[in-house]
Amino acid sequence: MTKRSYVPLTDRGVISVSGSDRRAFLQGLVSNDVDRVGPVNAIHAALLTPQGKYLHDFFIAEAGEFLLLDCEGGRIDDLLRRLGFYVLRADVTLEDAASAFGVTALFGDGAAEAAGLPATPGAAAAFRDGVAFVDPRLAAAGVRAIVPRDGIESGLKAAGFTAAPATEYDTLRLGLGLPDASRDMEVEKAILLENGFEELNGVDFNKGCFLGQELTARTKHRGLIKKRLMVVAIEGPCPEADAPILYDGAEAGRMRSGRGDIGLALMRLEYLDKAAESGLPFSAGAAQLVPRKPDWAAF
């Protein structure tokens, strides 16, 4: 592991959801079971189109009378607009809380313990006038803290955390094979199960209806997954996002986010089998890629 570090996630936003119907409101929309969210547990979930295609994903944690959504900052207005479609007469108030709250990643040796948490995915607790939770997808990704912006860095330093560059956390994420919102999942095209949402605790098939449930369940039960997001080791210049990945002249996948010698790519499974048999390399531009199935993946 690494030293105990923190990185303010400046590309993340926060939405507060309040009102007596807040929990039931989200429960009918998102892919995971909102009833599991409480003072000691947080979840990861997605909002889909009615046809089951990806729109947004976010973490949901509880702070007093509010549910807080740790979401993609650059698309927060779109998420607020889409959620607002469904409020109707429900007692629900949606607010952009990013001016008051920020999201910080805490990772490295003993990060969960220093935040007062067990190293269990989703474990949550009150933390410095906000909430901290172990990443519900994978404990190895560390802790996320949704806290007031003022004074957080001095408090973290007092708890033994050291400031780290944003690239350090991004490299950790890439190595674990964790997608980062629309950087890795194409809006209105991506399918949850191609991107590891089942293995990463982001979808609950027993919770009841949610937007896009039918396609998601059909994909699971009919075994229709033909592509998967994978870690790729990069030999050469890091390809741009959405660059085609070739195998023996045929398109075998598409590059997603990357940094230096590591990245994520959406790969067609049929070509992984062919490459394993032939030993021929994958390429993207001037680089050669070596795909690796994430340790948590079940395919």
Image (tube, helix red, strand yellow):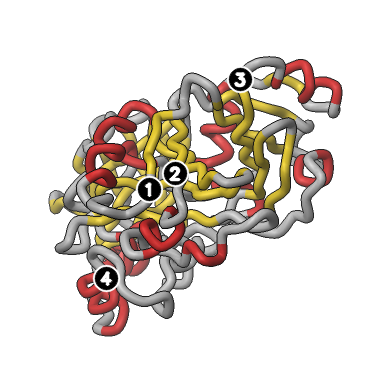
Query: Closest to the observer: 275 or 109?
Result: 109
Q: Is residue 213 visible?
A: yes
Q: For the residue labelled by badge 1, is the local secondary structure a helix, a strand or a loop?
A: loop
Q: Which sits earlier in the primary sequence, circle 3 or circle 4?
A: 3
Pointer 1 residue: 92
Q: Which mark is residue 17?
A: 2
Quadrant of the image for the C terminus? bottom left
Q: For the residue labelled by badge 2, is the local secondary structure a helix, a strand or a loop?
A: strand
Q: Which sits earlier in the primary sequence, circle 1 or circle 2?
A: 2
Residue depicted at 15% across the width and 63% down the height: 51
Task: Name the amino acid type tagged 2.
Answer: Val
Marks 1 and 3 sit apart, C-alpha to C-alpha, by 25 Å
Q: Which mark is residue 213?
A: 4
Asked whether, in this view, residue 151 is left or right of residue 235, the answer is right
Q: For the residue labelled by badge 4, is the local secondary structure a helix, a strand or a loop?
A: helix
Contact between labelled residues 2 and 1, with CB atoms less than 8 Å apart: yes
Asked whether, in this view, residue 225 is left or right of residue 235, the answer is left
Marks 4 and 1 sit apart, C-alpha to C-alpha, by 23 Å
Circle nearer the viewer, 1 or 2: 1
Query: Closest to the observer: 159 or 295?
Result: 159
How would you rate the neighbour count of disc 1 (Cα within 10 Å): few for under 14, some for 14-19, many for 20 or more?
A: many
Pointer 3 residue: 149
In percent of width and height, residue 282 lies at 30, 48
Task: Name the amino acid type tagged 1.
Answer: Val
Q: Which sits earlier in the primary sequence, circle 2 or circle 3?
A: 2
